[in-house]
Amino acid sequence: MEITEVKDKKLLRQFISFPYKLYKNDPNYIPDLILNQKKIFSNTNPFFEHSQALLFMALENKKVMGRIAAIHNRIHNNIYNEKTAFFGFLEAVSRDDVFIALIGKVSEWAKSEGLNKLVGPTNFTTNDSCGFLISGFDRMPVINMPYNKDYYAGFFDRHGFTKELDLFAYEHTAQNLKMHIDEKLLHRVGEKLFSEGISLRQVHFKDMDAEIMKLREVYNASNIGNSGFIPLSENEFKSTAKDLKTLIPEKLILFAEKNDETVGFIVALPDYNQVFRHIHSGRLFPFGIFKFLWHKRKIDNARVLILGVLPKYRGKGIDLHLYYRIQQNLASIGIHRGEAAYIMESNTVMNSIMQKIGGKLVKKYRMFSKEI
């Protein structure tokens, strides 16, 4: 077995296609579009404006046995005054020697970069998908959420890694929300917010540049203090917003405002994994596009992607009102269920809200770490 760095288009195609083969017979695996994967690993990804990543594959008799990305996130290390290396995009067959070789290669590279700790998985940052699924393997992943073999976490437990962070996903339904929310209380809170000049509105795509700036400011400000959070640069946020605009109706991005100040927001995303599961090749063309257009009409699930409120406006019920309104808007387009993810284990406020509104904890994800 040898570890090979991905340095050309042929090797990148092998790197991208490996999971399609690894999960071929797994009914819960959802193939990501190859087009999206190529974009993630291309130089057009704003991540590479400030940080570095190398891709490696484990080959045995020219057959791919595993893959991994070694990541030097310079923004993270500057913010937190750390010397941390990250790993991501890890996929491997069920053999410890493959995992050992891949992690060993990342550790070797990290040390050459002067780094002394390994954390992962992150793909590429904590603003992207991260963590290994450790419970909830009986469910399909929702859009942009990880799914992996159930033996991954066991390798890290056996080889000296410890838990860095757990992340939760809650299932929610319109019916449970109605059963658990006191509408009279919600009305009173709403009246109080109105009296303080706080109102909700949906995004205006026609003013997208200005809307993106408002959303970025609140996103970055509301997440300060969250474990491992890295503020998104203007280019990173614009790139993400551009992708989301093609997938999200205006009514699924809501702002909370006081006068001209944006004080909170919520974003929900229709679960396009319900579409991608039917495009087994991961290719939209020539025939995948027809499957996409056909199954897109049948989406009945969603992911509540992110909810944020500026610190000085917390405790007023803004988050609950945003969540309730987004549920109403989802129902208006025929979506009555979904998942709220991620929610950090340490975020006691959001975990409490999820439980109070009838959310059911259905999946757990874990990030691991080790001194190197």
Image (cartoon, rainbow, N blue to C red):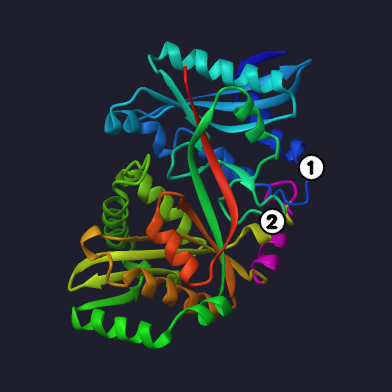
Q: Please indicate whether residue 202 sits to the left or right of residue 24 in the image.
A: left
174 is higher (above) or lower (below) than 95? below
On the picture, is 348 further left or further right than 7?
A: left
Residue range highlighted in magenta: 280-297
Inspect the image, locate mark 2, and give the three-letter code of the amino acid beneath it. Arg
Q: How far apart are marks 1 and 2 (CA)?
A: 17 Å
Magenta region includes residue 281: yes
Answer whether residue 174 is visible to the viewer in this image.
yes
> How many other residues sit within 10 Å of disc 2, few (<14), some (14-19) or many (≥20)?
few
**Residue occupying the point 62% across, 44% down:** 134
Q: Nearer the viewer, residue 304 or 236?
A: 304
Q: Where is residue 284 in the image (x, y as percent from the top left)?
A: 67, 52
**Quarter of the image where one finds residue 126:** top left
Do the residues bearing badges 1 and 2 touch, measured as CB atoms within 8 Å? no
Q: Which of marks 1 and 2 is nearer the N terminus?
A: 1
Q: Is residue 161 left or right of residue 230?
A: right
Residue under the point 74% across and 55% down: 287
**Is-magenta flag for residue 2?**
no
Residue at disc 1, secondary structure: loop
| Residue marked by disc 1 | 24
> Disc 2 on helix, strand or loop?
loop
Pick out the residue farthest to the right: 25
The residue located at (54%, 79%) in the rendering is: 331
* Occupied quadrant, residue 314: bottom left
- Residue 363: give x, y in percent of width and height: 60, 53
Q: Residue 113: x and y, percent?
A: 40, 15
Name the residue carrying label 2: 139
State the image coordinates of residue 109 (x, y, percent, origin top left). Answer: 48, 15
Name the amino acid, label 1: Lys
Which quarter of the image is occupied by the N terminus? top right
